[in-house]
Image: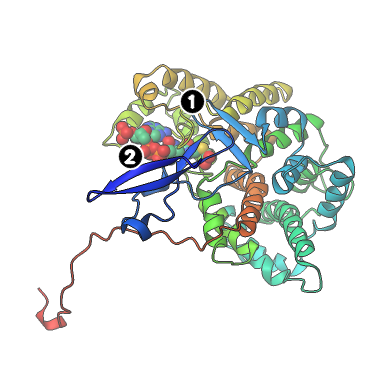
Amino acid sequence: MQETAKLIVDGRTFELPIVRGTEGEKALDISRLRNETGLISLDPGYANTGSCESSITFMDGEKGILRYRGIPVEQLAERSSFVEAAYLLINGELPTRQELNRFSVMLNDHSLVHEDMRAFFENFPRRAHPMGILSSMVNALRAFYPELPERGEEEEINITFTRLLSKVRTMAAASYKISRGHRVVYPRHDLSYCANFLNMMFDSPVKPYVIDDDIVQALNVFWILHADHEQNCSTAAVRLVGSARVNLYAAISAGICALWGPLHGGANQAVIEMLNRIYTEGGDPGPFILRAKDRKDPFRLMGFGHRVYKTYDPRAKIMKAMCDRILEKLNLDDPLLDIAKTLEEVALNDPYFIDHNLYPNVDFYSGIVLRALGIPLNMFTVMFAIGRLPGWISQWKESVDDPKWKLHRPRQIYVGPRERDYAPIGERK
Ligand code: CMC
């Protein structure tokens, strides 16, 4: 029997269906609310609003759980690869050996970027932020790779997914090389997805890049941890823009713009900037914690807090362990890591952070990992974007396949002036 909740408006009782997810979460289905009651719901920031039913990612913010297609992210980080996790997210199941091989071959086949796009990269101002460049370039991909009407719809979509996954990685490395005035390094057919990216970033005619399996594995884990996070800001942007039935490149480009913000993907860059400031100001995090607690001060402790996690972000736990491993392996002593650990300890014992459920999130340690891999600071959010691509793609695919699909068009409660007459300019005060 359908579970319902009762809503009483002006003495009339309405029944709202209750929807249950496979993990027991419950939601009120208010899709007929306005038709039946004349009311809408008001939920700024959508903190209580489910925008869709999804079978891709499950997270429980109270328990610190994250699973892709049912599989705990901890298991994927330990045993899988980014390419396999991408396949899982997009197709719903882990690939067989044959499917994985076929997918890898496709990623290799589509890894080059049209040579004419080079002119775009070269004409951006040198100081342009790589996220702005990336979102523009991804949008431009549609012009270079138009629809393939001769292929079936499914094949066309699979080619577009593969192009995005493969070319965005190539474009990100190329933009870094061009920004430094260096020769662009092309992808190599004999390297895996992550090794290829590192080689395109760091190989040089005067210093060949030596592939290190531990570094490649660290990058795999970094990207697996970022691969999806259900209805976060950038994914919601991809679904919203995609709901107008724009092409996938345009929808992904919108997601990249949303991710750029310091409250979302840009936090990994902001964390390192904050740790650097603490370091240059003597290394004591105390004054920064005081500022973060002051409600009159807009300053926030970057890398702390999350809209959904009200406990330690499970991704941050894995990232922290990886951070220790990679610094030890590379024999690096990063003073920012010591500051990060002190800051974490102080914050986790401070009543303000305890009462507000503010724990380190994935970005708190990811910046230190990226620094250790040699990734420049302004590329940090681009690294997040490459990792989030499988999530954006799978969420877009799910939304266009959804029989309940609708153009996203929220409503509002208008609180501006009531109707008034236009005043000619000479009569205005
Ligand atoms: N430092 C200090 N206080 C904070 C912080 C923080 N990082 N985050 C939240 N608060 C306080 C906030 O001031 C508010 O206090 P009060 O209730 O006393 O006014 C309370 O906690 C609730 O904050 P909110 O802004 O209503 O919560 P939210 O769910 O909208 O914010 C957030 C989530 C991630 C935007 C926020 O925690 C934040 O700004 N964190 C820093 C930026 C960051 O690390 N972002 C990366 C998120 S993880 C990567 C990703 O998945 O995108």
Q: Position of residue 369 (x, y in %)?
A: 64, 32
Q: Position of residue 249 (x, y in %)?
A: 64, 62
Quadrant where the C terminus lies?
Answer: bottom left
Q: Element at badge 1?
A: loop
Residue 164 located left or right of residue 275: right
Q: Nearer the viewer, residue 104 or 171?
A: 104
Q: Position of residue 380 (x, y in %)?
A: 60, 43
Q: Is residue 404 visible?
A: yes
Q: Element at badge 2?
A: loop
Residue at the location (35% across, 31% down)?
A: 292
**Residue under circle 2?**
298
Quick check: which quadrant has ligand 1?
top left
The correct choice, above or below, for 159 with respect to 201 in the image is below
Q: Identify the mark at residue 414; answer none if there is no mark.
A: none
Residue at the location (74% across, 54% down)?
A: 170
Q: Residues within 10 Å of mark 1 (few under 14, many from 20)?
A: many
Q: Residues within 10 Å of mark 2 (few under 14, many from 20)?
A: few
Q: Nearer the viewer, residue 145 or 20?
A: 20
**Residue under circle 1?**
311
Q: Amino acid at mark 1?
A: Thr
The correct choice, above or below, for 85 with respect to 352 in the image is below
Q: Amino acid at mark 2?
A: Pro
The correct choice, above or below, for 40 with respect to 379 in the image is below
Q: Earlier in the sequence, mark 2 or mark 1?
A: 2
Q: Position of residue 339 (x, y in %)?
A: 50, 23
Residue 149 located left or right of residue 120: right
Q: Nearer the viewer, residue 359 or 230?
A: 230
Q: CA–CA distance between discs 2 and 1?
A: 23 Å
